[in-house]
Amino acid sequence: MTSVADPTTTPSAGIDPTRWPDVARVPDAPIRAAVAGRLLARIARRHGLRIELPGGRMLVPAPAGAATLRLHRPGDFLRRIGAGGLIGFGESYQAADWDSPDLVALITSLATDPSTLVPPGTRWLRRLYVQRPPATELGSTEHAPRNVQRHYDLSNELFALFLDRTMSYSSALFPTDVRSGAPLADWHSLPTAQHRKIDRLLDLARVGPGRTVLEIGTGWGELAIRAAARGARVVSLTLSAEQLALARRRISEAGLADRVEVRQCDYRSAEGSYDAVVSVEMIEAVGRPYWPTYFSTLDRVLAPGGRVALQSITMPHERMLATAETYTWILKYIFPGGQIPSVEAVAQSAERHSSLRLTEDRSYGPHYAETLRLWRERFTARADEVAALGFDPVFRRMWELYLAYSEAGFRSGYLDVRQFLLTRGDAR
């Protein structure tokens, strides 16, 4: 095995320490770095990875065509991993300590069986680097607005660079190959696939003429527009000032301002009674401590005979429980305060905290992998335009990793996306 020791490593240069303090700083953790080096070699062998060191050396022999991790500053990489685990892995990418010719393939390989990344006898070491989510990022009424602002208020122009014209920031639903069942996805079909997803959710909720609809999580207004075009009256809630402004403008331009009201409002403050409640990939932002409140709110605002249609990313129940108190790179940099639920968690939370019951469950995870691929390709192709909006290289690498990391989660089967129908016994 080739050594990855690099005692001459210096802190990352050219990174704004006020904007990115934990990316600019390389931890002083030589012992943990040595342990991380041994684990890296073990992971490379077990997962068949190619770990390339400076000068073209390889850490361990690798099979042809193996997913590749290319280390530019191995000493910095191992110090970050040793001190911060997977958060350090992400920060190391932001700092350009490593790269990969196929980022998705690399992360997919690692995500396929995450429980094997650390040997069973050494899992106690997790407590040396695993952090709990900070209380200031929990999804309380006090902190939820700031969590939303950190992601969704970055810039409407940024999202417009990689989303399609529908401005839909959730999984699309593509046609499938009749033989393989694989999604048939390309950029030109994405708007139609987004409408197919929205329409299927609206059909689940039986949204039509004369129905009243509450949407929790406006996005940029496309679902509200399509619901109103069916003849429904819609109230849509968002905490994002940027989304609020653009959604209202798009709804007005569609000639539907008389049928849709967009409010800047926390879901817990929802008022009224509605025939249908719909929400697309918003429950993930709620946070596990607040799922009881979320489901009791759905129950409170749903009219007799009403239907709730939710779209949610999901993960296996045992992994959800194992990581519920873990502060991850995604939580730190992308979605503060979030928690992806399992199917069991949705069903149990509804049953324990409302009169709602899970009555339909439709899965289409491979479609999200393709949606993310299209977004990622668009984002990287328009890197100069992202930079022109004022986003620095650390941010751009952060978002490249976020999109690739998410795509890999769906390709490996670690993540899924589902549409749920929740009803009471009186549903019509």
Image (cartoon, rainbow, N blue to C red):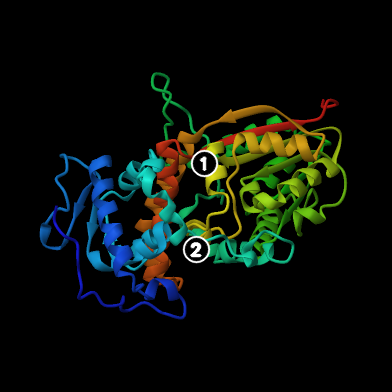
Residue 142 lies in what quarter of the image? Answer: bottom right
Q: Nearer the viewer, mark 2 or mark 1?
A: 1
Question: Where does the image place residue 39, in percent across and percent down from the top left?
Answer: 29, 52
Q: Residue at x 86, y 52 (%)?
A: 271
Q: Residue 73 versus residue 394: which sits nearer the camera?
A: 73
Drawn side of residue 282 relative to residue 211, left or right: left
Residue 27 lies in what quarter of the image? Answer: bottom left
The amino acid type found where label 2 is placed reads: Tyr
Question: Where does the image place residue 384, in percent across and percent down from the top left?
Answer: 36, 66
* Of the image marks 2 and 1, the number of the one nearer the N terminus: 1
Q: Which residue is mark 1?
A: 319
Dot 2: what SS? helix
For the C terminus, the quadrant is top right
Residue 366: give its label: none
Is residue 333 visible from the viewing direction of this image? yes
Dot 1: what SS? helix
Q: Is residue 371 above or below residue 423?
A: below
Q: Residue at x 68, y 42 (%)?
A: 226
Q: Is residue 7 above or below residue 234?
A: below
Q: Residue at x 38, y 38 (%)?
A: 112
Q: Which residue is mark 2?
A: 333
Q: Residue 1 versus residue 91: which sits nearer the camera?
A: 1
Question: Where does the image place residue 309, in percent across and percent down from the top left?
Answer: 70, 36
Name the residue at the top extreme.
179
Q: Residue at x 57, y 60 (%)?
A: 133
